């Protein structure tokens, strides 16, 4: 049984890559585990935590184990596992595979600068590797802050067998005696991640390839503990259109923000899945298809750029597919907020008139304004063309007379009036529709004319046509 985990840190980064990890777990019929890596006490916040949960829930990404889901391998917050890490740190210390380091941040900074001046890669010089027991005890008793470092095998190389990138070789001498426990007593990411992935019986680690350079360190830790390492797959990073890591600068800090902007979760999931992954040239996938087709074979090695053009296009496609009731539920509160309470049936009709036109849900507000506000501002060029021209005026006058007598005021009857008038006067339908559209909506673009006339209703239509006839 495959066990895959998504291990976000609640630090305000935009975690969208987890969707691909989830797809992999579901595709393989495995378990998906959510683990919150909150050991960075300065940067972790409970808001960011909530945003992770809400974002995953919104996308429909469910987890088999983790916060709120339970599981046999908890707790699933790293800050609740400190005693576990401590025990494992002690194990490495007692086996001589880790050591206390009392070097101060100031000293380390100085050494790094000196190394840089010599044009050498900055690495820890091993000063505290061989501190005598009594010295360690004395320093600890005196309250001097310390970290615990992993004693790295100084020679040889570590190979990451990556399912996407193939074998990546790292020379051990270029890796450092890295810190595994910080001076605040919290484990570092590399250490906690290895202990947890092992204890949680994770079989496959899928994560962004910004972590590739951490993986040899993690493999060395597995070796030090005598544990079998999981399989690794480093997925291409998802970057903003300026090629930088996705962050607040790119407009959203959490997936859930995209719901507020007006995206549908299915469009977002489809979009994220396709970032750096392809299955032929298919673009639109149902959730079931994504699960069925997602595979590491289709994952590219190159970073993917998160951009809104394609996301918008997909969102439009998904809006066309959703049920009318769902569209109404999404739009109704926005319309009430913008234009106050209106008859529910009227709102429903208005929303449905735009089902084929919306790209983002909130666009309903400006697009449908003419349905709620009588005081229209007309497009000036169009106004010149249609309202200051005797021919159009004549047409609008006749249209008004005919619609005024129309009973019942239904779409089929309205259509018959327009067509009858065109025939009677030997005109093209457009000659009637364009000025009428301008009179009723203020613009030359709207949902189909007969729908607009029917929804607005006889009174409003006559009143708006009448008003335009008075324009000099
Ligand atoms: N907490 C790490 C992050 O958010 C997880 C990396 C990993 O999956 O190992 O980047």
Image (cartoon, rainbow, N blue to C red):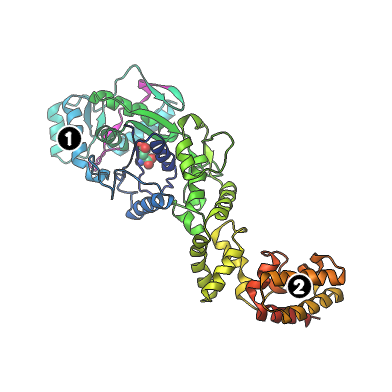
Task: Tell me, yes or no, whether the highlighted magenta stretch contains residue 440.
Answer: no
Q: Residue furthest top?
A: 156
Residue depicted at x 24% and y 23%: 226
Q: Secondary structure at mark 1?
A: helix
- Say the numbered circle drawn on residue 87: 1
Asked if residue 152 shows in the view, the reply is yes
Of circles 1 and 2, which is in front?
Answer: 2
Left or right of residue 13, residue 80 in this image? left
Task: Tell me, yes or no, whether the highlighted magenta stretch contains residue 178.
Answer: yes
Instruction: Say which quadrant the C terminus sits in.
Output: bottom right
Write the start and end of the magenta stretch as one range. 168-188
Residue bearing mark 2: 417
Residue 263, above or below 447:
above
Q: Secondary structure at mark 2?
A: helix
Residue 347 lies in what quarter of the image? bottom right
Residue depicted at x 58% and y 68%: 349
Confirm or reject: label 2 Cβ below 8 Å from ligand 1: no
């Amino acid at each position: 049984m495959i066990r895959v985990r998504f291990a976000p840190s609640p630090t305000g980064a935009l975690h969208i890559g987890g969707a691909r990890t989830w797809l992999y777990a579901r595709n393989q019929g495995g378990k998906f585990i959510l683990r919150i890596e909150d050991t960075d006490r300065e940067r972790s916040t409970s808001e960011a935590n909530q945003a992770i949960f809400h974002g995953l829930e919104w996308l429909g990404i469910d987890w088999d184990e983790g916060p709120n889901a339970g599981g046999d391998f908890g707790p699933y917050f790293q800050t609740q596992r400190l005693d576990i890490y401590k025990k494992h740190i002690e194990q490495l210390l007692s086996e001589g595979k880790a050591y206390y380091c009392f070097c101060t941040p100031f000293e380390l900074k100085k050494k790094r600068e000196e190394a840089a001046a010599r044009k050498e890669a900055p690495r820890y010089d091993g000063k505290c590797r061989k501190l005598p027991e009594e010295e360690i005890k004395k320093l600890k008793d005196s309250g001097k802050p310390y970290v615990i470092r992993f004693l790295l095998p100084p020679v040889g190389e570590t190979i990451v067998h990556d399912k996407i990138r193939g074998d990546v070789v790292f020379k051990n001498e270029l890796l450092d005696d890295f810190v595994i426990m910080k001076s605040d007593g919290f484990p570092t990411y590399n250490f906690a991640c290895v202990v947890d992935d092992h204890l949680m019986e994770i079989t496959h680690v899928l994560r962004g390839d910004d972590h590739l350079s951490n993986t040899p360190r993690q493999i060395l830790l597995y070796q030090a503990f005598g544990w079998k390492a999981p399989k690794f797959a480093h997925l291409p990073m998802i970057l903003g259109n300026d090629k930088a890591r996705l962050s607040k600068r790119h407009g959203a800090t959490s997936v859930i923000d995209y719901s507020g902007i007006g995206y549908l979760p299915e469009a977002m999931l489809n979009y994220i899945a396709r970032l750096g992954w392809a299955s032929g040239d298919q673009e639109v996938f149902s959730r079931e298809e994504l699960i069925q087709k997602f595979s590491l074979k289709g994952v590219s090695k190159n970073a993917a750029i998160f951009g809104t053009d394609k996301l918008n296009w997909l969102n439009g496609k998904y809006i066309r597919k959703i049920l009318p009731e769902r569209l109404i539920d999404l739009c109704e509160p926005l319309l009430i907020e913008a234009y106050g309470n209106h008859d529910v049936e009227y709102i429903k009709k208005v929303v449905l008139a735009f089902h084929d036109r919306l790209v983002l849900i909130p666009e309903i507000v400006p697009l449908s304004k003419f349905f709620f506000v009588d005081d229209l501002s007309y497009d000036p060029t169009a106004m010149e063309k249609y309202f200051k021209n005797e021919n159009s005026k004549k047409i609008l006058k006749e249209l008004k007379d005919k619609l005024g007598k129309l009973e019942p005021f239904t779409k089929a009857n309205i259509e018959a009036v327009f067509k009858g008038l065109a025939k009677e006067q030997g005109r093209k339908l457009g000659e009637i529709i364009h000025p009428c559209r301008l009179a009723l909506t203020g613009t030359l673009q709207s949902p189909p004319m007969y729908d607009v006339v029917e929804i607005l209703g006889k009174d409003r239509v006559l009143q708006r046509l009448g008003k335009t006839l008075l324009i000099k």
